Image: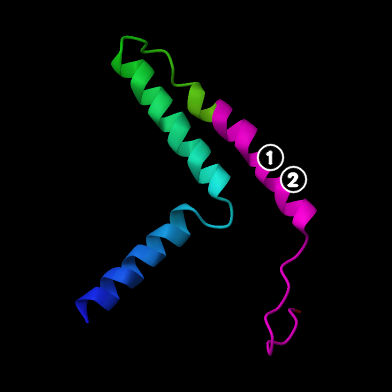
Amino acid sequence: MIITRLKAFGAFWYDFVVGDDWRVALGVVVALTATWGLAHNGHPGVWWLLPVAVAVLLPLSIARAARKGPPRPKAGEPPPM
């Protein structure tokens, strides 16, 4: 019972953080790590790195999703309205 709940908890957080595009999640982790590393090593003015990362990652993610098209319904499910 506890293992089932732990698996469900982990699956929720994986889906919440990674979502549809693992590349965005990786980009955010890289940007956060770079910002922390630079700020920790005496570069206090690196706040701009995160907005730049979002400005780069968001259009790339949208373009990738637009190329894939809308999701297809699974077998037996009615088509979306």
- Whether residue 75 is in magenta: the answer is yes
x, y percent for residue 68: 76, 57
Q: Quadrant of the C terminus?
A: bottom right
- Whether residue 74 is in magenta: the answer is yes
* Residue in view at x 75 percent, y 65 percent: 70
* Labelled disc at residue 44: none
Q: Secondary structure at mark 2?
A: helix
x, y percent for residue 62: 70, 47
Quickly name the residue at label 2. Answer: 63
* Circles 1 and 2: CB atoms closer than 8 Å: yes
Name which residue type carries label 1: Leu
* Labelled disc at residue 60: 1
Decide if residue 40 is on the left or right side of residue 16: left
The residue most toward the bottom is: 76
Q: Is residue 66 above or below residue 43?
A: below
Region in magenta: 52-80
* Residue in view at x 68 percent, y 90 percent: 76
**Marks 1/2: CA–CA distance:** 5 Å
Q: Secondary structure at mark 1?
A: helix
* Residue in view at x 67 percent, y 80 percent: 74
Dot 2 surroundings within 10 Å: few (below 14), some, or many (20 or more)? few
Q: Quadrant of the N terminus?
A: bottom left
Decide if residue 68 is on the left or right side of residue 56: right
* Residue in view at x 29 percent, y 17 percent: 40
The residue most toward the top is: 42
